[in-house]
Image (spheres, helix red, strand yellow):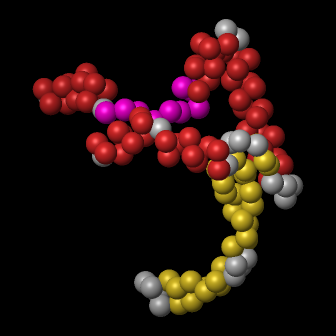
Amino acid sequence: MFISNFYIWFAPLLKKEKDMTKADVINEITEKTGIEKIAVQETVESFFKVIKNAMNDGENVYFRGFGSFILKKRATKVARNISKNTQLTIPEHFIPKFKPAKVFVEKIKKSEKVKSKAASA
């Protein structure tokens, strides 16, 4: 009982650093711009919806200085179900992929925070 209560209360303090979620992004934009949280949330949701719909229509989406959301073609391949010892064919298909811009990659490579985080991991 004591251990479970300890974990409930102190687990958040034991985490090193958390990754950013969509809610965190919305909160940060709200704080920095002063725009209402609901408006920011609707804007972010609309942004993702536009990207999903464009890619669903077969279009790539490019953001200069940030990166590109592109469709990558996966060729037909033969896979095996080892438990049944059978083969099945996976048809060619497309998957979404994010390709960061060179400027973005260079900024991350030069980041001291990223280097210190990688060294401590």
Check the image and report above or below for 48 versus 38: below
The residue that appears at 61% across and 86% down in the rendered structure is: 78
Question: Furthest residue to the left?
Answer: 2
In this picture, residue 80 sits left or right of residue 6: right
**Residue 107 place in picture, x, y as percent:** 56, 41
**Residue 12 place in picture, x, y as percent:** 31, 26
Out of 108 and 62, give the one closest to the viewer. 108
Q: Is residue 96 magenta?
A: no
The residue that appears at 31% across and 45% down in the rendered structure is: 119
**Which image quarter: residue 93?**
bottom right
**Residue 2 place in picture, x, y as percent:** 13, 26
Q: Is residue 23 magenta?
A: yes
In this picture, residue 12 sits left or right of residue 76: left
Question: Furthest residue to the top?
Answer: 34
Residue range highlighted in magenta: 16-24
The residue that appears at 57% across and 46% down in the rendered structure is: 106
Q: Tell me the chief SS of the magenta region.
A: loop
The residue that appears at 30% across and 32% down in the rendered structure is: 15
Residue 56 visible from this viewpoint = no
**Number of marks:** 0
Query: Quadrant of the image for the N terminus?
Result: top left
Residue 85 visible from this viewpoint = yes
Check the image and report above or below for 18 versus 70: above
Check the image and report above or below for 120 versus 85: above
In this picture, residue 17 sits left or right of residue 33: left
In this picture, residue 84 sits left or right of residue 87: left
